[in-house]
Image (cartoon, rainbow, N blue to C red):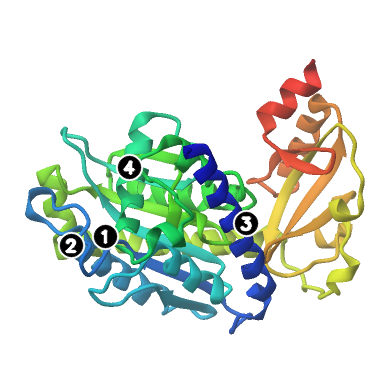
């Protein structure tokens, strides 16, 4: 029975995602970098109340401060899922981001646990590797029970069922690499600048992240159940420092996208003239090096990519991805990666495709070496 409900949920989400993509290209302010900030919980949903602190209030104060800092940067537009103490359904939070044709979605929360656990962790959508990750996702996903007609809205999805939560991961993986990049930058700021305990970048099945069609992260800024950390997060000093770390990470992420293609003039080309993977029929396993991601279409010519030859481009959602080289020999890919990094693409990495579709690198390596 749970399996049937999970399949219905996947079908519903797939339909909604299709409908979203029909309109996603018609957002306002397409010349700006749009960041949607989501303060977790709100209204009748207080979130966790560890040591008497209110997650919904702390998350909102942090989000408003992050937005205030980002809005001072030219070319950046901030949209909030809520700016006051109101309840917003998970499906509506994602809808706000999708309607805005956002470049990023950042959801802010505070953690809780029955132990003395403390520190920061940032989640991206993915399979929860252990029971702890599942419990975090279950707690955040349980908000749907406060929504009217939640069974209809979420196709019978059950936050308490591991099978049901796993089902939401089947229909969207395309923004995972950018999401991990942003999550890593946020954790780096928390750790290096604020000396917070680093609990790492993790994957779990959060409904709010699945509802979006852009790179998305969920930030657990600390544990309210750990008294010292709760007091810090409830203080103006703590909220100011956490907000600054998040906003700086977002701007560093944006800068990396802007810089990845070098100091060049972007050349707009019709979408019907897509080059690279879209026009190829690949067989078996092919490895490529991803060197850049950007919101503008750039001709995959050597003069635009620091002299690199054999660059291809593919559009995924609202972003363009650029790949260097291709080979079915993973060992040769290591050489391509080294060349790309020497050319200045320090954050480049290897990706794999099977019959033209992106697959997990570990799976591809295993297949290629057998």
Residue 307 seen anywhere in this rendered image of the structure: no
175 is higher (above) or lower (below) than 287: below
Total numbered circles? 4
Q: Earlier in the sequence, mark 1 or mark 3?
A: 3
Q: Is residue 219 left or right of residue 119?
A: right
Residue contact between numbered discs 2 and 4, judged by CB atoms under 8 Å: no
- Front residue of 193 and 362: 362
Q: Is residue 356 above or below residue 210?
A: above
In the rendered structure, which disc, 3 or 2, sits on the residue that comes first in sequence? 3
**Residue denoted by label 1:** 241
What residue is shown at x 21% (from left), y 44% (from top)?
A: 112
State which mark lies toward you, 2 or 4: 4
Q: Position of residue 178 (x, y in %)?
A: 58, 52
Distance from the alpha carbon under mark 1 to that under mark 3:
39 Å
Marks 1 and 4: in contact by CB < 8 Å?
Answer: no
User: Could you tell me if residue 108 is visible in this image?
Assistant: yes
Quarter where residue 68 is shown: bottom left
For disc 2, the marked residue is: 237
Separation of disc 3 and disc 2 at Cα?
43 Å
Residue, disc 3: 14
Q: CA distance from mark 3 to mark 4?
A: 24 Å
Mark 2, secondary structure of its residue: helix
Q: Nearer the viewer, mark 3 or mark 4?
A: 3
The residue that mark 4 highlights is 136
Q: Of the two numbered discs 4 and 1 on the same chain, state the one appearing first in sequence.
A: 4
Q: Residue at x 41, y 79 (%)?
A: 72
Residue farthest toward the left in the current orientation of the protein: 52
Circle 4: element type: helix
- Verify CB contact (< 8 Å) between mark 2 and mark 1: yes
Q: What's the residue at 40%, 47% (across, down)?
A: 122
Quadrant housing the C terminus: top right
The alpha-carbon separation of the residues under discs 2 and 4 comes to 26 Å
């Amino acid at each position: 029975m749970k399996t049937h409900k999970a399949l219905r949920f996947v079908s519903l989400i797939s339909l909604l995602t299709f409908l979203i993509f029909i309109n996603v290209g018609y957002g306002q302010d397409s010349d700006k970098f749009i960041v949607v900030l989501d303060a977790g919980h709100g209204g009748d949903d207080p979130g966790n109340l560890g040591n008497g602190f209110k997650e919904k209030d702390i998350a909102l104060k942090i989000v408003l401060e992050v937005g205030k800092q980002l809005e001072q940067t030219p070319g950046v537009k901030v949209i909030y899922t809520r700016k006051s103490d109101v309840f917003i359904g998970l499906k509506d939070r994602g809808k706000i981001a999708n309607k805005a044709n956002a470049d990023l979605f950042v959801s802010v929360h505070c953690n809780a646990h029955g132990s003395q656990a403390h520190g920061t962790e940032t989640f991206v959508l993915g399979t929860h590797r252990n029971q702890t990750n599942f419990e975090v996702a279950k707690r955040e996903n349980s908000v749907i029970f406060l929504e009217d007609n939640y069974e209809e809205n979420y196709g019978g999805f059950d936050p308490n069922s591991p099978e049901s939560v796993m089902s939401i991961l089947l229909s969207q993986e395309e923004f995972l690499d950018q999401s991990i990049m942003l999550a890593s930058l946020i954790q780096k700021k928390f750790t290096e600048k604020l000396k917070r305990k680093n609990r790492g970048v993790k994957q779990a099945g959060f409904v709010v992240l699945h509802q979006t069609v852009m790179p998305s992260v969920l930030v657990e800024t600390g544990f309210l159940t750990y008294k010292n950390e709760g007091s810090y997060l409830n203080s103006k000093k703590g909220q100011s420092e956490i907000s600054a770390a998040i906003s700086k990470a977002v701007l560093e992420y944006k800068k990396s996208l802007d810089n990845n293609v070098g100091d060049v003039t972007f050349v707009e080309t019709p979408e019907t003239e897509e080059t690279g993977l879209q026009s190829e029929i690949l067989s078996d396993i092919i490895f490529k090096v991803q060197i850049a991601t950007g919101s503008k279409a750039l001709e995959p010519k050597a003069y635009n990519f620091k002299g690199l030859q054999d660059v291809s481009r593919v559009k995924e959602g609202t972003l363009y991805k650029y790949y260097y080289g291709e080979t079915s020999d993973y060992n040769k890919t290591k050489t391509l990666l080294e060349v790309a990094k020497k050319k200045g693409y320090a954050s480049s990495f290897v990706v794999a495709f099977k019959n033209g579709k992106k697959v997990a690198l570990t799976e591809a390596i295993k297949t290629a070496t057998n």
